[in-house]
Image (cartoon, grey):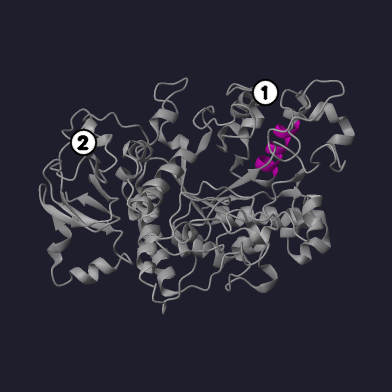
Amino acid sequence: MLYEAHVRGLTMNLRGVPPELRGTYAGLAHPATIAHLKRLGVTTVELLPIHASLAEPWLTRKGLGNYWGYNTLGFFAPEPRYATRAAREAGPQAVLAEVKGMVALLHAAGLEVVLDVVYNHTCEGGADGPSLSLRGLDNTGYYLHDGARPAALVDVTGCGNSLDFRRTRVVQLALDSLRYWAGEVGVDGFRFDLAVTLGRNGADFTPYHPFFVAMTTDPLLGSAKLIAEPWDLGPGGWRTGQFPAPTADWNDRFRGAVRTFWLADAGAQAKGHTGRDLRELATRMSGSADLFGLGEVPGGRGPLGSVNFVTAHDGFTLADLVAYDHKHNAANLEDNRDGSDDNRSWNHGLEGPVRRDSPFAVVLPLRRRSMRNLLGTLLVSAGVPMITAGDEIGRTQRGNNNAYCQDNEISWVDWETEPWQRDLLATAAYLLDLRRDHPVLRPARFASGRPAPGDDVADLAWFDARGEAMTAQLWHDPHNRVLQMLRSGRPGADALVLLNGSLDLQEVTLVKGRGADYELVWDSAWERPGQHRADSDAEPMSLLASPGETVELESLSMRVYLTRR
């Protein structure tokens, strides 16, 4: 499981970390930080950029800075701001040693390290930007230009300039930098910001670009974890599912489908409108074969080519998705123009925070259940799940969906938690444990919809509320908001996932499957995973259900059953 985190923001408020180490490389590798990551079930930490960077001049004039760091100054140097004061005062080698020490300590704890890297542009900005390195060395040799006389910069990144990956020295620079971080610093992989720019031959993108071929066949880099952000702002810039193996892609279609089903459609129903049908949701939960099933090898990259996520560093946090209909980015000093307006969120009837003693506190349990629905769907879907740091405890950014310039409490994870946040953490950790312990919840191959040889249950099948196979009419019916997903796990347990996206309690007849009883292992109506054990002590059979039995599914909720063998 990927855990996207900012070196500074993750530990600035983490009490178990000594004050002098908070917000630093050393703080990220502190035992208190590692203990949380291990408790949650993280396997890979994906760090926002740690290459040396520089804030844009227009930001500094406003008294702000580039907190996220997507504005690279040096591709071989770590960002000194994230080093301890002692390391900074000792000099660059001490800063580098702290970074290496962080990686080594995370490795010792069994955690991989993936770096978010920005090779699509530099901090030199547009034509009126500063000349700091590449512009002074060879402006037209490093940056993409339009070929006119005089030549003008072509900006496909939205950052003023774009590195020109038709140029040999640009490709060499990126490859040398990657080899340095993998070979010398010891990181396990890279997530490429605006990766489409790296595959452009001028205006056109190709997945067989020499840079990708060189990287994926390199003796060192070819075995690294490679992740693409598969878009940029240029022509034909959306390329999800089109990167070459072994690269995985951030799957924005998954994010959109899950948010739409649980939030945007639910909000529409609350206003008397209909939502969308279930085809997109089922496609994403089953691994996005339409995107990742193509390639040089039959079956393409498989579902593991899809990095599934509901939130990321840009956009609403998990808690803000269920509390805000609109972005609130005034702190960025851009008159709320920045940040996406396509949030597919739902405030459940009231915008922003609600006090527990408020007359409107009735929405709080609904918001919490929606967060659990989003997490649950993410963690039972085929693909590689990614969680954004702090979502496991319901972190808020106060409705800011573009906190790139907020190096303060808006962005830093607040570790002072209320009981409901500790319940959410327990839920996230429990779901990750379920996923780890039951391979049926993390298939590595696309399903065929047919039984495997020697099996009598299809590897994946979809059913309606009556326990009957979904028909074409139901797949296209936006009023149908109940779905059952059955996965064969032979020789282990089968998994049955029930989804109710309607505003009403629904009666659902469990599918027959192979005839074995089902055990309810998780219900998003539960505030905390252990709750079901306490509630069922008097009636231990209440967690068991037989094929063909009818159960009641709470409104806007989901359940996970496993067969008893």
Asked if residue 175 is among those painted magenta in the image, a careful observer would answer: yes
Residue 456 lies left or right of residue 193; in this view the side is left
Q: Position of residue 500 (x, y in %)?
A: 27, 51
Who comes first in sequence, dot 1 or dot 2? Answer: 1
Magenta segment's dominant SS is helix
> In terms of secondary structure, where does tag 1 sit?
loop
Q: Does any portion of residue 25 appear in the rendered image?
A: no
Q: Position of residue 166 (x, y in %)?
A: 72, 23
Q: Position of residue 68 (x, y in %)?
A: 67, 53
Residues rendered magenta in the picture = 173-184
Amino acid carrying label 2: it is: Met
Q: Identify the disc placed on residue 436.
A: none
Viewer-side residue, 197 vs 542: 197
Viewer-side residue, 373 vs 45: 373
Viewer-side residue, 237 vs 294: 237
Residue 378 lies left or right of residue 493; in this view the side is right
User: At x 51% / y 35%, what residue is drawn?
Assistant: 248
Q: Position of residue 96 (x, y in %)?
A: 74, 53
Q: Does any portion of residue 51 appear in the rendered image?
A: yes
Q: CA distance from mark 1 to mark 2?
A: 43 Å
> In terms of secondary structure, where does tag 2 sit?
loop
Q: Is residue 182 above or below residue 506?
A: above
Q: Is residue 215 above or below residue 563?
A: above
Q: Are marks 1 and 2 in contact (CB under 8 Å)?
A: no
Q: Is residue 530 above or below residue 522?
A: below
Residue located beneath label 1 in the image: 203
Residue located beneath label 2 in the image: 470
Amino acid carrying label 1: it is: Ala
Viewer-side residue, 22 vs 375: 375
User: At x 51% / y 64%, what residue is drawn?
Assistant: 395
Residue 368 lies left or right of residue 530; in this view the side is right
Instruction: State which quadrant residue 327 falls in.
Output: bottom right
